[in-house]
């Protein structure tokens, strides 16, 4: 895993913590890791609920009102880059995924039932959201 560097490993732990919060299962972890790295590389906001589900808001729904009013550095809808600290305790699988993301170009995912649907197209992502949340 290379030479010890505190900031590199802290970054990996922060990424692993977001993976831990977002993944529906272990199989999805490398895919979510890839989405995080791909979005960071393109200077996109991460826009991940898992980062906002932290501290007193743990296990609470992320609403548009909360996104607007939350000025903490955990709000990846508002701020670019990673939160300053990990958002949860991580599993070995999440750490591995943070070091070894899948080699895919995905930028988006949405929870659909018990799994996530991934895509690199924003247009397709919007279709996936409609499909998964139609009433």
Image (spheres, rainbow, N blue to C red):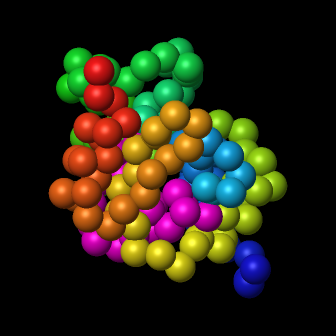
Q: Is residue 41 magenta?
A: yes
Farthest right residue?
A: 92
Q: Position of residue 71 (x, y in %)?
A: 29, 29
From the image, give the main secondary structure of the stretch colored magenta: helix
Q: Nearer the viewer, residue 30 or 2?
A: 30
Q: From the viewer's perspective, tell me whether residue 111 is left or right of residue 31.
A: left
Q: Please give the name of the residue rendered at 61% of the width and 42% of the height, measured from the top-left corner.
A: 24
Quadrant for the N terminus in the image? bottom right
Task: State which quadrant residue 21 falls in.
Answer: top right
Task: State which quadrant residue 2 falls in.
Answer: bottom right
Q: Position of residue 9 (x, y in %)?
A: 66, 65
Q: Position of residue 105 (x, y in %)?
A: 40, 74
Above or below, comparing residue 90 to residue 1 in the picture: above
Q: From the viewer's perspective, tell me whether residue 24 is left or right of residue 79.
A: right
Q: Please give the name of the residue rendered at 56% of the width and 43% of the height, measured from the top-left corner.
A: 115
Query: How many discs mark residues in the rendered view?
Result: 0
Q: Please give the name of the residue rendered at 56% of the width and 20% of the height, measured from the top-left corner.
A: 59
What range is drawn magenta here?
30-48
Q: Is residue 10 visible?
A: no
Q: Is residue 35 magenta?
A: yes
Q: From the viewer's perspective, tell me whether residue 72 is left or right of residue 2.
A: left
Above or below, comparing residue 53 to residue 43 in the picture: above
Q: Position of residue 86 (x, y in %)?
A: 59, 44
Q: Please give the name of the residue rendered at 66% of the width and 71% of the height, measured from the top-left corner.
A: 99
Q: Is residue 57 visible?
A: yes
Farthest bottom residue?
A: 2
């Amino acid at each position: 895993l290379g030479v010890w560097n505190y900031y590199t490993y802290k970054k990996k732990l922060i990424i692993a913590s977001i993976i831990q919060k977002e993944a529906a299962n272990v199989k999805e972890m490398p895919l979510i890791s890839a989405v995080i790295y791909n979005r960071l590389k393109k200077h996109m906001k991460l826009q991940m609920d898992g980062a906002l589900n932290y501290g007193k808001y743990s296990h609470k729904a992320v609403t548009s009102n909360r996104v607007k009013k939350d000025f903490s550095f955990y709000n990846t809808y508002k701020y670019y880059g990673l939160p300053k600290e990990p958002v949860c305790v991580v599993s070995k699988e999440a750490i591995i995924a943070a070091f070894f993301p899948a080699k895919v170009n995905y930028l988006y995912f949405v929870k659909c039932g018990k799994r996530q649907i991934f895509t690199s197209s924003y247009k397709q992502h919007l279709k996936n959201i409609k499909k998964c949340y139609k009433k």
